[in-house]
Structures are given as structure tokens and as C-alpha cells.
Amino acid sequence: MQVCRVCAAQSADGKAFCEECGSPLAAACRSCGSPTTAGKRFCGDCGAALIASAAEVSLNALDTDPVVAARAPSAERRVCSVLFCDLVGFTPLSEARDPEEVRELLSRYFEVARTVIGRYGGVVEKFIGDAVMAVWGTPAATEEDAERAVRASLELIDAVAQLGRDAGAEGLAARAGVVTGPVAVTVGAAGEGMVAGDAVNTAARVQAAAEPGAVLVDEGTRKVAEVAVGFIAAGEHDLKGKAAPMPLWQATRVVAGAAGSQRIDGLEAGLVGRDAELRLVKELFHACVERRTPRLVSVTGAAGVGKSRLGWEFRKYIDGLLVTVWWHQGRCLSYGDGVAFWALAEMVRQRFQIAEEDPSTVAADKLVTGLERWLPNPDERDYVGPRLAQLLGVDYGKATSLLGREELFAGWRLFFERLAATGPVVMVVEDLQYADAGLLDFLEHLLDWARDVPIFVLTLARPELESRRSGWGTGRRNSTALTFDRLDDAAMAALLDALVPGMPTAAKTAIAARAEGIPLYAVETVRMLIDRDIVQPIDGVYRLVGDVGELAVPATLQSLLAARLDTLEPAERRLVADAAVLGGTFPAEALVAVSEQPEPQIRRTLAELVRREVLGVRADPLSPQRGQYAFVQTMFRQVAYDTLSRRERKARHLAVADHLQSTFADAGEEVAEVIAAHLIDALAAVPDDPDVADLRERAVNMLTRAGDRAERTGAPTTAAKAYTTAAGLLDRTGTPDTELAAAALHERAGVATSTVGDFPAAVEHYRKAAEAYRRHGRVRDAARADTSVGASLRRQGRLEEARVQIVGALEILQRDPDADTVAALAEKATLEAFAGNAEEA
């Protein structure tokens, strides 16, 4: 009789499958694959149990006790992905170390394996010496089981290498094998003996065939996982117990989100030189989740050094985890001094699936629907709704006055706290160097005040951020600052090898020398070679097919991008230049509105530019910019823009301004500062054209609206800059009407700067307003401004100077008392109280 290794039932000799549960009765050890004798309890080669221990103990009871039999685990056939992973170099390492050190290292390895496998939804079946076996597809199966098994394998290989470095054992490595196929699963069982079948034996054999640091998979696993993981053919292997050679593939890296979402099929090498930083970001995220506390990770570095790539690698990692993570991503715009809270509003639109082109009524409906989902408490909905609506610039449908900055911050924070209560929240802010001060303040508020929730904030910025917010990402117990330096020569060579295997050493040396450690330079050089048909994709890998010869490598990244631009057809170059005026991201409809080319030709050219990796398409299903086009490299946009003549720039900037004003709700209210920036650029391009007065008036109007919106959303610094810029445009004209309009804007800028405590700047604004009013005989307006000067001086402790200003103002205002008179008297009383003159107060 044969004994089933899964359910312990007896079957007649010669049967291939168990007559009770259908499990294979192949006479091979599950651990080492050696032939075994039917009915034997242990393998004669490795000593592993051939019968599950729980079943073995109760064999006789099953024959005699129907109650016990009823409680015994049943078995079923399932398709699972099985992972085997073992250590390489562990035996000599253990021989050279103290046994306690070896035990501790092995324990750390087991813990790392359990953690990594668990994060990807796998179940550890058993540990055998220094090997681990894990299973995906039981007790519950998902469509991404094979993909997650491979992701976990790659992560485990990397984690073991780091474990070796930490332990001073540089030679320690792991190798893994993943096989997907039918297995027999013991329902309700856990641990050793949970699964059995040919896939288990094969996975062990595949793992044994892998080189140190490699992950090999079978064809079934590759077919399922290749939408999200890159593979290269590893040849056919003669595996023990297999009648014919078996084709295997080596997993190289993750190339997309779960199930292939947001996959990039163009040129993309693996992350080089940033492994430690990416690993740290991952671990800080998991610490944030486990401890349920907010965490900030700030990454700074020069353009092209790899910040955005780190964010992309982190996105792919998060998307592959089993746990549901609420991902949000926003980019700070480079126009002017930063559009107030643009990146935050982009994140909120993403969560509520509000597209940029949605009318205000549609956006409001989506906001209401989303709030009902995320905030089941009606009182909290009533509190958060108006605050999010004010951020997005939509009518929430309930009469609410404009809310102050602290009220807005509290409402926005509560929304993300309630969201984080249902799953970890990730907020990635790109180009933080362009952020308005209000956004930086809110992020600090969120990190300081959010409690007992996993909110992970990752900011990516250039070094210019330091001049705007010194010490960002430092000085907090829950913050970590990372600085990306340039890559060394070895890392650059590895990057080029990954991009184009087999590139001549001389060419690599020339490129690396010019790149000066900037990986983007290497990537763009290869793209230039692709444009020249010297490099072509063959079987999914870019190969050198032409003679590089004396490769003329441009001296700078800008000249390299210009060389790539020159390879485009004239119509393509014109369209790229048109797109450069629109910004980093744009819909096709906007390009049609701006360009002079016919729409069918534009659509065809866009497809070609995507093929040539000049442009890409935003594929994130939750992004408000889904389906829009974007420059693959932002610096390419600047190079293309610089090719435009002054008159071409003016015409295109005006076309963009008109398009935005007609497309966005309320005549462009939400993007008023962007429209103003385009109008100002048009003015600067040709400053002596006859229409300069009309353009200046339009720009001032949009800047004023931008300042008003910034005030409503609690961004007084941004508001002050908008008012100041508008006043500066008017100051240049020198006419009475424009000077008086500029004076009113200076007053508003004074109010905004006072709100953030910049009283010296407020004094300057109010004094400019008072001087302009006096020049044009507006003495009461000048007195009102003088009162504000006095208030700002008093707040700086300059009481005598303040008294002179206020007393002088009252001499004029008291001649015909009004609201300004009352305000001046109140300020005089406050001043005297501060000075200790109770009777005067």
C-alpha cells in the first residue's frame, strides 16, 4: 500500500494519485527529490518526513475513529506558485564563525524571509536548513500570485545581500526558483505538508540551477508575471527527475505596477547606484505602517540624478504589495512662484477621480460621492467638505464663508487621517523646489498634528529648495533627509551595460566622462543612438547594431538633448516646440488649440514622438491627468522651448493663455497664475508691440484673481507675491489710474505679508500705497495706509515710529469719521496699551 503525503490515506500500489484527495503519489522526496519507497516514513537521502506529521500521528485513529476522521484536514487541487530560496556561501561562513553568531545570522535570515514573503501575500510552508519554501495561491488565490512570488523572490535576493553586508559577510547571497502549477493543498493546514505535487519538487530543482543572486522561473510563471517583471532567457536545463530539458527564464527586475499597470515599454534600465536609498525608503514606509505614525522622507539632488526614478521604483514596489495602500502623487508647477497648493489639489482630485477637464458641477458631485465613501460620519463630512471644495475651487452646495488657513489645514488633515485609518496613505510630491510656502506649511502641519495613522510623505526636490525652506526634511524625529550625489564611474558603467549590453568600452568611457555622474545623460545618449539606428531593440533588449566608431558625445546634457531634437523631422520639431510652451504635461486637445498644424497630423506626430520616447502618455487610472502627454525628460522641454523665436514664443503663449481661460471653470480661476505667467512671458518676448497695454491689463487681472484664490486657500505668501507682481506691472506705466490700482494691490500685499508675520515687508507695501495715494490727492486713502504702517511697526516693537504714523493718520480721518477712523482709533488704543499708557489707551 502507498501512503498519501497530503491526507495520509492509503492507496493501492501502482496508483499514480491518491484515491481520497487526488494528490500525486509520485515516489520522490519533497525536499531533495530523491526516489523513495512506498509506505516509508522518512527519506533515506535527506531524512525529511515523507508523511505530514499531524497525519502520521493519527493514522490508526483515522481507521477506527469516525469523529477524528471527520475533523481531519481535507485536500483540494489548486494552481499555486511555489518559491524555493536558499543561501549560497553559508556553509563556509558557518564553519568560520562562532555557532552563536551563525544561529543569530540564520534567525535574522528567517525573519527577513518571513517579512518579505508576507508583504507580498505568500505563506511560508517550511524552512529546511538554510532554505525556505513559500506558496502563493492558498488559502485564497489572486490573479497576481505568480507575479507576487517573483517580486518577493527579487526582494528576498536583495535583502539577503544586504544582510550579508550588515553582518560583515560580503560573500553571502541567495538564489531562488519559482514554479507555477497544480498542487494538492491540505485545506486548513499550515506549515510543512500544506502543499505537495510536482510543482514543489520542480521549484526546488529550479532553485538549485540558479546562480547566486539570481531568480529562475519556469515558463508558466514567466507567462503570467512578464506583464510586470522583466525576464531574460536562461536556456534549457537538465533538472533531476525531469525526462526532458526544461526552459527557464531569469527574472531581472520589476518593470510595472501590479498586473502590468503603467508599464513602460521603452528604454529603461534597472535602478543603479541607489539600491541602499530605495531599500531605506521601503523600510521607513513599513516602519510608518507598523508604528502608525506619520513619516517624511525628503530626497534632494541635481536635475537628472535619479530622484524621479526612485519615486517610480517605490511606486512599483507599493503596487505589488498585498496590503491596500492609498497612493497619491502631485507635482509642483514651475510657473511664477508656485500655484497655491497645486500638488495637494492634484492628490485630492486623484482620490475623488476628478479630471482636470471636469466642469465644476461634475467635480462637486464626485466630491460629495467620495466623501460619503471615505467619511461615513455626517458631521465630519460637513466639516471636511467645504474645506476640500475651497482647495479645489468648486461649489460644495452649502453656504459657507471663506475659511481661514488653520481651518483649511485642519479639514484637509482630517480627510487624510480618516483615509489612513482604512489603509496606509502615501503622498509623493515632485519638484518640491517649486512649491508655494503654503504647501510646505501644510505638509509640516500634517506631520506634526496627525496622530496614530500611517501617512508616508515622500518629497523630491532639487537643491534650490534649501533657499526657500532651509532644513526641510531635518530636525524632526519623524523625518529623514536623503541627498543624491552623482554616480561614480563604476555605477555609470553598470548603467550603460544595463541599457545596451555589449557597448564598447571606449564608448562607455566617453559617455561616462561627459556625464559627470548624471544618469540622465547616459540614458539620453543611448536614446540619441536609437534615433540614429545605431542601437535597436532585439527580442526585448536594446543591442548595438551599428558601428559606433569615434562616437561624438556632446559636451553637455543640453547640447545632447539639442542633438536629439535635430534628429526629428521639421513637423515633429515644431510640434515639440508647441508642446514645450504648454508645460510638462498637456492634453492633445490643448496642443491642437495651440499648434497651427491640422489635428489629424498632430495625432500622427504625437504617436511618433511617443514611439521615439520624446513624449510619454500618463497611464495612471486614478490620475486627473490620465491620457495626457508628458515630456519624458523635463529638460528636453526647455531645450525645445529655446529654439522658438521671440515672436513665436509670444504667439504660442497667448494661444495657451486663451485655451486655458476657455477650458477651465470660471474663466480659468483655478489656473489664474498659470495664465498670468503665459501672458507675462508673451509681454517679455516682444515688449514693444502695440498690444502691450492690453496684455498688461489681462496679466494684472489674472494675477489679482490668483492672489484672491491663494488667500481663500490659506496661502498668503503666494497671494502676496501675486499682488506684488501685478503691482509691479502697473508701476511701470506711470498713469494716475494704473498707479492708484497698484497702490490698492500693495495694500492687499501688505495684508497678506502681515498674515505670515513678515511685518518689514508689510511696512514697505503700505508705504508704497500711501505715497501713491498722496501723489494723486487721495489723502484719506493715504491715511488708511499710514494706519496699517503704524500697526506693522507696532508689531515689530517700534512703538514711537508707530505712534507718529497713527497720530498723523487720525488728524485726517477724524475730520470726517468713518470705518477707517474707527480702525485707526482701535490701533491707537492697542499701541498705548502695549506702551503701558493705560489712560491714553
Image (cartoon, helix red, strand yellow):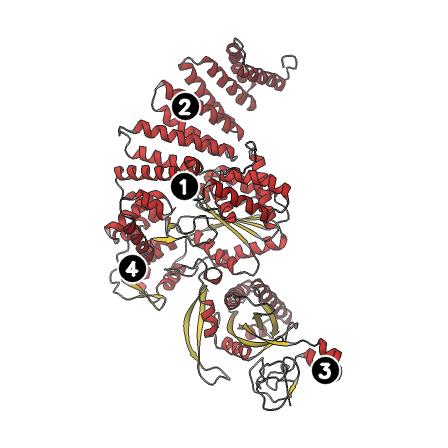
Q: Is residue 612 above or below residue 731?
A: below
Mark 1: which secondary structure?
Answer: loop
Label 2 to label 3, Cα distance in Å?
94 Å
Mark 2: which secondary structure?
Answer: helix
Label 4 to label 3, Cα distance in Å?
71 Å
Question: Which residue is denoted by mark 2 in the rendering?
Answer: 742
Mark 3: which secondary structure?
Answer: helix
Q: Amino acid at mark 4?
A: Leu
Towards the viewer: 153 or 403: 403
Label 1 to label 4, Cα distance in Å?
31 Å
Earlier in the chain: of badge 2 and badge 3, it is 3
Badge 1: few (under 14), some or many (20 or more) residues near its Cα, within 10 Å?
some
Earlier in the chain: of badge 1 and badge 2, it is 1
Question: Which residue is denoted by mark 3 in the rendering?
Answer: 62
Q: Is residue 761 above or below residue 485?
A: above
Earlier in the chain: of badge 4 and badge 3, it is 3
Towards the viewer: 13 or 553: 13
Q: Is residue 211 visible?
A: no
Badge 2: few (under 14), some or many (20 or more) residues near its Cα, within 10 Å?
many
Give the label, 4 or 3, closer to the camera. Answer: 3
Give the label, 3 or 1, closer to the camera. Answer: 3
Question: Which residue is denoted by mark 4 in the rendering?
Answer: 529
Q: Amino acid at mark 3?
A: Leu
Q: Is residue 792 above or below residue 681?
A: above
Q: Amino acid at mark 1?
A: Ser
Badge 3: few (under 14), some or many (20 or more) residues near its Cα, within 10 Å?
some
Left/right placement of residue 641 relative to residue 32 reads left
Earlier in the chain: of badge 4 and badge 2, it is 4
Expressed as whole percent of the image width and height from the top left, the position of residue 395 reads 51, 37
Tag of residue 334: 1
Outermost residue toward the top in this view: 815
Left/right placement of residue 831 relative to residue 244 reads right
